[in-house]
Each structure stands twice: as structure tokens, then as C-alpha cells.
Amino acid sequence: MRDRGADGYVPAMKLPDARGPLGAAVLDHLRGHRSLAEAGVRLQEAGAGDRALTLWTLHELYFRGFDDVDADMEWDPTVVGLRNELESDLESDLRRAFEAWDGPMDLPGMIAAFEDRPGLSTFIRTSATAAQVREILAEKSVFHLKEADPHAFVQPRLDVAPKAALATIQFDELGAGRPDRLHAKLFADTLDAAGLDPTYGAYVARVATSTLTVSNVLTMFCLRRRLRFAAAGHLAAFEATSSLPCAAIVRGLRRLGFDERVVTYYDEHVEADAVHEALAWEELCVPMIDGDADREREVLFGAFACMEVEARNAADLLERWT
């Protein structure tokens, strides 16, 4: 565990170990040892895990960065070009899945359809062991330790009413002015109380490919102005499918006798996300759609993508124990 500052955070981290030749070539490029062109690695030959961790690494340049990477690499043309290629492949995969979707084309119906898939919250509530819960928390740290950060990129791209709605949600997510109540900080406290490393990025090198994809999809939506409608739909789906699962997780954590500091993060979200659900759809998405069918479809694409990658991740993790 690296030393943390007084506020509990580390400003940056070391580059994670690569999962394949693409990632290895990118690490060399970021460290200034050898350019990607010199490495001669073909993107088409990279495996899913290699691609996912490489994209997560490139995304991280726009957040806290890395101790061993020059800050100017954020806008290095080769880095931006590779990020574009990886995001294009990821978006295409999600759009193919969305086009093949034959379920309801409204948010409540879509949510109901996805509820039929096995979820981690039910597993935690009913049968997970303490060790399995800790493993899940480590996986989820990749997303929750940067919770709300990606949406900061969406804020300036919105008109007045949706901007105000997103700002209201963000204010709660960022602790309503209290540093100790930031949701990312609450999750760091959860990890610490569960005997895990609360350091930002501590588990990224070992988590499942599907876990990295959950993070990559949200970051892609939020970084690209073209995908701002998908980002709004993603947020609406996330908030609408969070409150009840968090309540189930609270019951599971108490069943297993976890310290209340582990429970606090999820307990906070039972109420907060119930409020955010209405805000995210009625005051963020609806004004953005403004009666336009194409915009509505993009919002629903974002909602579908959120639930699809979460469902894939849940199935992936549950397969370890079932």
C-alpha cells in the first residue's frame, strides 16, 4: 500500500503490469522507451483482457495519471489515436448488442427485463461468504473509487436544465460539501474496514476483463461529446438500478457480520440513489431528449449499455463460485 495524503487519496499511481503485447508496447511508449510504431503490435491480435486494461490505462491519463508517465502523454497523438481505435471497437460491440436487443424500448421495461439476469446483490444477500464479498469489493473498487469523476466531463456539454440536474446529482455524489462524505471516499473507507487496500487503482491489475469494461464504457461515454446522450442514459439506468440492490447488499453484509463502516457506503446509496433516479431521468434525460426520437434512442442505448456490461460482469464473477 502506498502512502496516502491527509485526505486519504494518492495523487497518482504506477502503471499496471500489461496483460499482453499491446499493453506492453503501450507501457514502453508511455515511459518513453520505445514508440508504438517501433513495437509493431497489431491491435487486431490483442486479446480481450489486453485491450481492456490498455484502454483503462489510456483513460486514466485523463484522470489522475501515473507517477511514471509524463503528464503531456495525455495528448500524445499516438495515445489519442490508439484510444480512438479501442473505443471504436468497444462502442461497436455495444451497438451490435443494442441492435440485437428485442426487449422493451423504454427505461422501466428495459430495467425489468435485465432484472431476470443473476445479480451480485442477491448473491451477497443470500449466500456469499465473507471472502467472496471481499473479492467483489476489490473488483468494484475500479469503478467506485472514481465514482462521479467521469461525469465532470459531461457537465459543460449540457444545456441549462440538464446541467442543473447533473450538478445536483454530482453535489450529492461529491459529499454535498463534506470531504468525508464523498462517495468515492466512503467506498475507500469500506475497503479499509473490510481489510482491503483502499488505495486508488490498487486492484486494477488483477480484476476481471468485464470489470475493466464497466469502467471503460462509462469513461468513453463521458469523454466524447458525441456520446453525451448515452452518458445521460447510462447515469439514469445506474441510478434506477442501484437503490434496491444496495439494500440487498446491506442485508448481506450484516448477515456476514461486517463492520458498520463496510455497510455505510451501501446504506448511503439506498436513499440517495432513490432520489437520483427521478432526477436523472425526469430532469436530465427528458430535457436532453426534448421530443427527438434519435436522441431518445441514444439515451436508451446508454441505459442498455450500462445494464448490459453490469450483467456481463455479474455473470463473469458469479461463474467463479457457481
Image (cartoon, grey):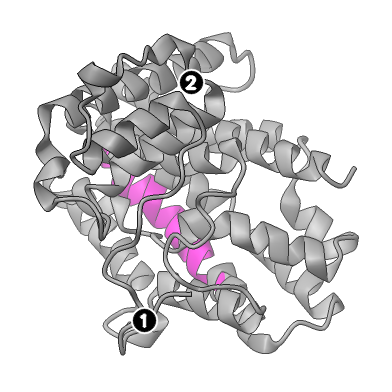
Q: Is residue 308 left or right of residue 198?
A: right
Q: Which mark is residue 94?
A: 2
Amino acid on which the number 2 mark rests in the picture: Leu
Q: On screen, 294 above or below 27?
A: above
Q: Position of residue 18 (x, y in %)?
A: 46, 38
Magenta stretch, main secondary structure, is helix
Name which residue lies at 61% across and 76% down.
267
Task: Residue 280: say if magenta.
Answer: yes
Q: Which residue in the structure is indicated by mark 1?
A: 4
Q: Which mark is residue 303?
A: none
Name which residue lies at 66% across and 79% down.
195
Q: On screen, 196 above or below 289?
A: below
Magenta stretch, residue numbers:
271-288
Q: Position of residue 290 (x, y in %)?
A: 24, 31
Secondary structure found at label 2: helix
Q: Nearer the viewer, residue 43 or 84?
A: 43
Labels 2 and 1: the sequence-earlier one: 1
Question: Does residue 63 show up?
Answer: yes
